[in-house]
Amino acid sequence: MIDWLAFLIVLFSALLGAGIVVSTFSFGIRLLTVSGRTPIVTPAEFTDAISVITPAEARAAEKRAAKAARKSPLTESQKRAALVGAWACFGVSGIAVLVGIYLIVPALHGLA
């Protein structure tokens, strides 16, 4: 017999956990961008990639990021606070992932 209440509890806790991890990570990316440190991914060569940006497109993206950083209305202390907040969000996201792994793997908490 299926315990539907337990199934629903697992479903909603999984959705909540995924939402927390994704939200904190994306908020961290936003704060990182606000602090003037826009993450730029350099082009990579993959044989089966759908599309890869060219080095010229990467340079253009870096120029746009530098221009946006110069035009930022934030003071240096506000940028520093945003950077600290970004790393705090990344930390919370990483800890949530580690707790999820700990809960999933029974060998980690002696129930094996």
Image: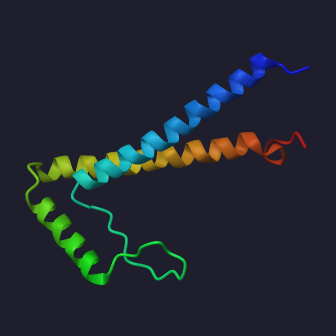
Percent position of residue 12, x then y? 62, 26
Q: Is residue 47 above or below residue 93?
A: below
Residue plotted at (56% across, 39% down): 18
Residue plotted at (63% across, 47% down): 98
In the image, 108: left or right of 34?
A: right
Residue at the extreme top: 5
**Closer to us: 79 or 32:** 32
Q: Is residue 37 above or below residue 11?
A: below
Percent position of residue 19, x then y? 51, 36
Residue 88 appearing in the image: no
In the image, 63: left or right of 18?
A: left
Percent position of residue 33, x then y? 26, 55
Display coloring: rainbow
Residue 8 appearing in the image: yes
In the image, 52: left or right of 13?
A: left
In the image, 1: left or right of 21?
A: right
Residue plotted at (10% across, 62% down): 70
Percent position of residue 26, x then y? 39, 46
Q: Number of marks in the image?
A: 0
Q: Is residue 51 above or below residue 110?
A: below
**Closer to us: 17 or 51:** 51
The image quarter containing residue 102 is top right
Residue at the extreme front: 50
Quarter holding the N terminus?
A: top right
The image quarter containing residue 111 is top right
Quarter holding the C terminus?
A: top right
